[in-house]
Amino acid sequence: MRSKTYYQYLAGITFAIIALVAVSCDDDGDDIVPDQVPAVTTTAVFNITESSATSGGNITENYDSPVTARGVCWGTDSNPDVSGNKTIDGLGIGPFESNITGLVPGQVYYVRAYATNASGNGYGSSIQFTTLGNQAQVPSVTTTIVTSITTNSAISGGEITSDNGSTVTSRGVCWSTSPSPTINDSKTIDGTGIGSFQSNLTGLSTEQSYYVRAYATNAAGTGYGNALQFQTLAGSSTVTDGDGNTYNTVTIGTQVWLKENLITTKYNDGTSIPHEENGQGWQHMTTPAYTWYDDNYDEIGSVYGALYNWYVTDPASNGNKNICPAGWHVPSKSEVELLTEYLGGSGVAGGKLKEEGSDHWDAPNVGATNESGFTALGSGGIGANYSWNLRKATAFWTTTERETNEDWSYYFGSITRQNDNAGTSSAPKWHGTALRCVKD
């Protein structure tokens, strides 16, 4: 039989156990849970592009330990963590949104939300998504007008206005005798990237019609500019008129033009053109005549050419004669419109036709580039009874009448020092103005 002291000892142990259990309970009798990492859910992925996406998460519990960082982490492994790519999107519990950037097109990724407190990092579920495939387009390209045309060469080029999302790795021009040349035809290679470039076309055939267009290549393929038609020169690039004057020529698109104003006093059969001095005699004339600006051949006419009334160009008025060299003619209104269209339209063609600088134009010679090679000079004209606008403007007759039996016809111009326009407008047939010829 055990002593009383032994039972007292057992009672004391029991009391200690009860007391220990008591201190492990709060006042409400609930258990105290040790610290834990935050509870997190991952938001579905949306706004997926080639290189970005949007996700996020929701922190539903921080377990009495403040959330000090939150966001999403992503990668190509199925369980990304904060040691890799991640966003940092504030702190605290509740929902948040995350922008994922720097992704690769057509790639499978995994993303999951995370939140950090004193106990560590809590993660949401891992969600798989795939970025869009490469949606880049071929580059946007325009073709530069063809200049410096010779018997076997020419200069063109282009401008790449946008690479449309993919770096331009090759650019240049391609050409052939067919209307839609490609890089499988003759071509140049003129660098990389966007912007303007110049191309030299070589190895062309004499007096041959070609089509050229700029191209640019990126990962999506090859983009092409507009196709332009031009013709190489014949073996000789000069012609002679009925008075023995020699002129240089220039090819612009499919047309070949004199590069200088007519200076002849004769038709191409050797017949003289009547000369009429400036003054009252010019107004309302109805027969062919020519003159010099201010009646000054030596200082003005020899440089800027002669001035003619419209009747010089009219077969019905001149006895069916031709003032232009053999094989050439005074242009019609439609031929002038073809020229200005080739040069980009009447709003900019004047600048491309005018000689640059101030040798033969007063300032400001607005927009003058002469990139066509036409070399228009400020030759002025004969107005009411006098010479006017030397170095300020020029115009060239066409053969087209505004209306039958009206005392008006169209001329090419007026090209002025104040803008870069060039179109067609009408003027009295007795006006005196310059002449250019175009090849038949």
Image: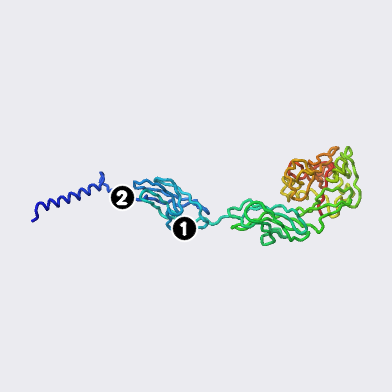
- Between 310 and 422, the one lying in front of the other is 422
Q: Residue at x 79, y 47 (%)?
A: 376
N-term-proximal mark, 1 vs 2: 2
Q: Which label number is shown at residue 27? A: none
Q: Residue at x 34, y 47 (%)?
A: 63
Crowding near the residue tagged with mark 1, few <14, some 14–19, many ≥20 C-alpha atoms within 10 Å: few
Residue 337, given in percent of the width and then of the height, sits at 76, 48
CA separation, marks 1 and 2? Answer: 34 Å
Contact? badges 1 and 2 (CB < 8 Å)? no
Which residue is tagged 1?
76
Q: Quadrant of the N terminus?
A: bottom left
Query: Disc 1 residue type?
Result: Thr
Residue 157, given in percent of the width and then of the height, sits at 69, 54
Residue 2, given in percent of the width and then of the height, sits at 9, 55
Please name the colour scheme applied to the rendered image: rainbow
Viewed as shown, does residue 106 lie left or right of 416? left
Crowding near the residue tagged with mark 2, few <14, some 14–19, many ≥20 C-alpha atoms within 10 Å: few
Identify the element where label 1 is drawn.
Answer: loop
Q: Which label number is shown at residue 34? A: 2
Q: Quadrant of the C terminus?
A: bottom right
Q: Within the image, what quadrant is residue 225 found in?
A: bottom right
Residue 254, given in percent of the width and then of the height, sits at 76, 55
- Between 196 and 225, the one lying in front of the other is 196
